[in-house]
Amino acid sequence: MLKTGISSLAPKEKRTSFILSFLDLSSELKDKIFEISFEIRIEYFDTEGYQYLSTSVIDLGEYEGITELGGEPSYKLYKEIEKIRKLIEGFQGSSSTKRLKVDLFTSEDRDTDEKAIEERFINNNEA
């Protein structure tokens, strides 16, 4: 796939691919998956023509016994947004409209309510 190269890649830009699934391979190869290691060699040139070389070794043995590595950030974000959406839908109650049910109280309403509670408490204690 990359034998033809990548025409441009900006600083801190990345290329990802889900062609190789670790979970699919591990189900096919069982424990032999952890015996696999490979080397990735990246060679590139900057705009002035200077050549750079980066080599990384991927040893799947490092992942033996690990079931999850942090998870996919975009999937985690999706799940969190889904939780927020469900929470907001709960504010609507069983109403079929898309409006929130809101009871507004002013300071005057709260004062009146507090006085009524105090009066009930006093009347109940006198009886």
Image (cartoon, rainbow, N blue to C red):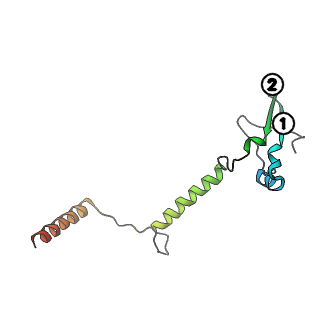
**Which corner quadrant holds the C terminus?**
bottom left
Q: Position of residue 82 (x, y in %)?
A: 57, 60
21 vs 72, left or right, is right
Outermost residue, left direction? 126
Q: Is residue 88 visible?
A: yes
Question: Is 4 located above or below residue 44 in the figure?
Answer: below
Q: Tag 2 or tag 1, which sits nearer the N-term?
A: 1
Question: Is 14 located above or below residue 76 in the figure?
Answer: above
At mark 1, the secondary structure is strand
50 vs 68, left or right, is right
The amino acid on which the numbered mark 2 sits, given as a three-letter code, is: Glu
Residue at screen point 64% across, 47% down? 70
The disc at residue 48 is 2
Q: Which residue is mark 1?
A: 39
Residue at screen point 9% across, 70% down? 126
Question: Is 117 located above or below residue 27 in the figure?
Answer: below
At mark 2, the secondary structure is loop
101 vs 68, left or right, is left
Question: 10 Å neighbourhood of mark 1: few (<14), some, or many (≥20)?
Answer: few
The disc at residue 94 is none
Mark in the foreground, 1 or 2: 1
Q: Position of residue 54 (x, y in %)?
A: 80, 30
Q: Is residue 6 visible?
A: no
Q: Position of residue 40 (x, y in %)?
A: 83, 36
Question: 10 Å neighbourhood of mark 2: few (<14), some, or many (≥20)?
Answer: few
The amino acid on which the numbered mark 1 sits, given as a three-letter code, is: Glu
Q: Quadrant of residue 123?
A: bottom left
Q: Quadrant of residue 1?
A: top right
Outermost residue, right direction? 3
